[in-house]
Image (tube, rainbow, N blue to C red):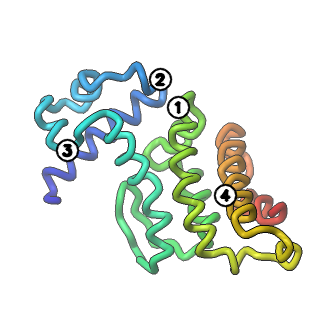
Amino acid sequence: MDRRQRKTRDAIFKAFIELLSHKDFASITVGEIIERADIGRATFYAHFETKDYLLKELCEELFCHLFDTDKGEKGHHHIFSCDANDSLFLHLFKHIAKNDNQLLELLSCENNQLFLRYFKSQLLTLVDSNLETLKKEKYDELPHDFLVNHIASTFVETVKWWADDKCRLSPEQITNCFLSVI
């Protein structure tokens, strides 16, 4: 994607994020998005087939940087730019605390279930592939599927609680709290 296309795509994402932070997803129109992004309708549809597809792509942009780190990529760049080697949970908490791309508002707004549901679906795969690093002896008796779902669900609910609590605990503190209860 060339620089001009990336700039247009970022403008669409920014407009969509602003609308999502104060308006229900179902009531947002493509017209509102293109007006706020200051682009034409054809330009919007050149990038995204539908508003639903835009939501899916936004979720991927918001969270794929975290999942890319599992593949050993360093200095990755999507919507976020970082060069972090933290644990995968601490990494995400740090991004939320920085409030990159209004992530904190999105996780606290009425549309948060859209993002948390997508995040959990991606997190399940990541937890499954990293379960040995998280596993404790007491987990040996638990069914694998149950354990993966429990850890991912607990993490998603921890993120939601922390975002609703305005991130009063530091990323390190919330990571320690999360790890101590799983």
Mark with earlier residue (2, 1) = 2
Provide residue 176's location: percent of width, then percent of height.
77, 64
Kind of residue at disc 4: Ala
Alpha-carbon distance for marks 2 and 3? Answer: 22 Å
Alpha-carbon distance for marks 2 and 1? Answer: 6 Å
Residue, disc 2: 24
Circles 2, 1 touching at the beta carbon (< 8 Å): yes
Kind of residue at disc 3: His
Residue, disc 3: 47
Kind of residue at disc 2: Asp
Mark with earlier residue (3, 4) = 3
Label 4 sits on a secondary structure element that is helix
Circles 1, 3 touching at the beta carbon (< 8 Å): no
Picture quarter containing residue 109? top right
Alpha-carbon distance for marks 3 and 4? Answer: 31 Å
Alpha-carbon distance for marks 1 and 4? Answer: 20 Å
Residue, disc 4: 152
- The residue at 82%/69% (across/down) is 142
Few, some or many residues within 10 Å of mark 4 (<14, 14–19, 20+): many
Q: What's the mark number on residue 111?
A: 1
Provide residue 160's location: percent of width, then percent of height.
66, 43
- The residue at 19%/44% (across/down) is 47
